[in-house]
Amino acid sequence: MIKKVLIANRGEVAVRIIRACKELGLKTVAIYSEADITSLHTKKSDEAYLIPRDPIKAYLDYKNIIRIAKQSGVDAIHPGYGFLSENHEFAQACIDAGLIFIGPTPEQIETFGDKVKAKKVMKSLGLPVVPGSEEPIQSLEEAYDIAKDIGYPIILKAAYGGGGRGMRVVYDEKSLKQSFESAQKESLAFFGKGDIFIEKYIQRPKHIEIQILADKYGNVVHLGERDCSIQRRHQKIIEITPSPVLEPAVRNKMLGMSVRAMMKYGYESAGTIEFILDQNTNEFYFIEMNTRLQVEHTITEMVTGIDIVEQMIRIASGEPLPFVQNDITFRGSAIQFRINAEDPKRNFAPSPGRITAYHSPGGIGIRIDSAIYKDYIIPPYYDSLAGKLCVWALNWDRALARARRALDEFIIRGIPTNLQLHREIIRDEDFIRGDFDTSFLDNKLNEYSYKIENEVQKDIIALAISAAIASHYGL
Ligand code: MV4
């Protein structure tokens, strides 16, 4: 068994991994940048080492990270999500240095990092894929031919892309040239490779993903699905398990196909298979495989009781999965709300700064994963995720009620956050009915903004009143 782990990450996920290590009796080593001297992960780990580089490069400097790992005597590195988590060269460098990379093999990371290759592999393993080009497009002429063949609308995607970069939806032949060229340019600029492929565009799909755990001995289980349709600009903000409207027959087909594909492939570690679901036809299509721990793994843990980070560590240590599919039970319904340091009134611009007041909800069925605290200053260099609120209850309706209660309890002052947006969504009739797809937030934002304004004003009035009372009593 692994005895000491370096966490090559920061923020809430670094804290999450440290917690799993502590429960397993493992020692932990944190790394941190100069911007993260006051961050929680540096305080909660047994040891912490500064990487004196610019705040982003510090967490990508894998030569330095591996050197610290060797010097501090760890036997494994957990990469968390983002940063180096899907960098196959880093995974290989860990192995070459005699360290265990807590994740899949470098080859597996590389295969699924190439979306064209991933599609080919998954198709050969029996998963349905969206009709489109089998290879990256070589010329504009080829793009016209394939688009005509499959019919508009089509979507252009970057083979090495992510976060919607290099992605373009094309509704007619007229706009193909311009979209193709700009997608290529953007892909080259962001990913160093301009490879673009084409798919039929599925309009207003649901985004459903399957959580997989697989050990080194061919044992594979699923931990159910997550509905990740509530997103803005490819940033998920709410995730739900189980999906409140997915038909059991469709769910079972998706789960069964995913497990069989991963068994045939020989995947190991935690992984997530992403599908888009066409709600008109109930057809689903594989789009991407994520070979890392995901931000939203928490809700799966709430309904299964399985600690996914613990299992990743055990799998990497060479232990077989301690359960088979039939041992896993799914209980109730869980929702995750990503609490972001961003300002909905300023087009969701990041809002780093000092937290002047912090009170997180508690009570039955609540889980908070956060790395912020009162007087913590959120640095401006990283993504805007400040924390995650997860609620669990026996069913969807009770989870909604609990979420309303918990969101209303949450107090974060000093910086704007998206808390109020969550309070609006959770009261939305369409959301409550499960009637949402990936276009939900785009359609709703105008409707909500007026209420957000009002709510903030109420908050200011409440503050003014309490200040007046305080001064009246000489407090
Ligand atoms: C799609 C799609 C519709 N049709 N593929 C792929 C990466 C992921 N981040 C979004 N992806 C999508 N792939 C086909 N063939 C819809 C999405 C999609 C999306 C597309 C444009 C704008 C917002 C979106 C939100 C979720 C999913």
Image: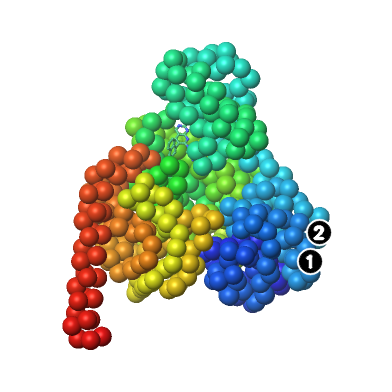
Q: Residues within 10 Å of mark 1 (few under 14, many from 20)?
A: some
Which quarter of the figure is the C terminus placed in? bottom left
Residue 213's label in the rendered image is: none
Q: Nearer the viewer, residue 236 or 375?
A: 375
The part of the image, by quadrant, that contains residue 324 is: bottom right
Look at the picture and state if 285 lies above or below 265: above
Return the disc, 2 or 1, that comes first in the chain's sequence. Answer: 1
Mark 1 C-beta to ligand 1 under 8 Å: no
Residue 21: image x %, image y %?
61, 71
* Residue labelled with disc 2: 97
Mark 2 and mark 1 residues within 8 Å of each other at the beta carbon: yes
Element type where label 1 sits in the image: helix
* Residue labelled with disc 1: 70
Q: Residue at x 35, y 67 (%)?
A: 413
Look at the picture and state if 27 lies above or below 290: below
Q: Residue at x 33, y 40 (%)?
A: 442
Look at the picture and state if 330 lies above or below 87: below
Residue 356: image x %, image y %?
39, 71
Which quarter of the figure is the N terminus placed in? bottom right
Q: Nearer the viewer, residue 189 or 85?
A: 189
Q: Residue at x 45, y 15 (%)?
A: 173
Q: Give the spatial CA distance, label 2 vs label 1.
A: 8 Å
Residue 115: image x %, image y %?
60, 36
Q: Nearer the viewer, residue 177 or 214?
A: 177
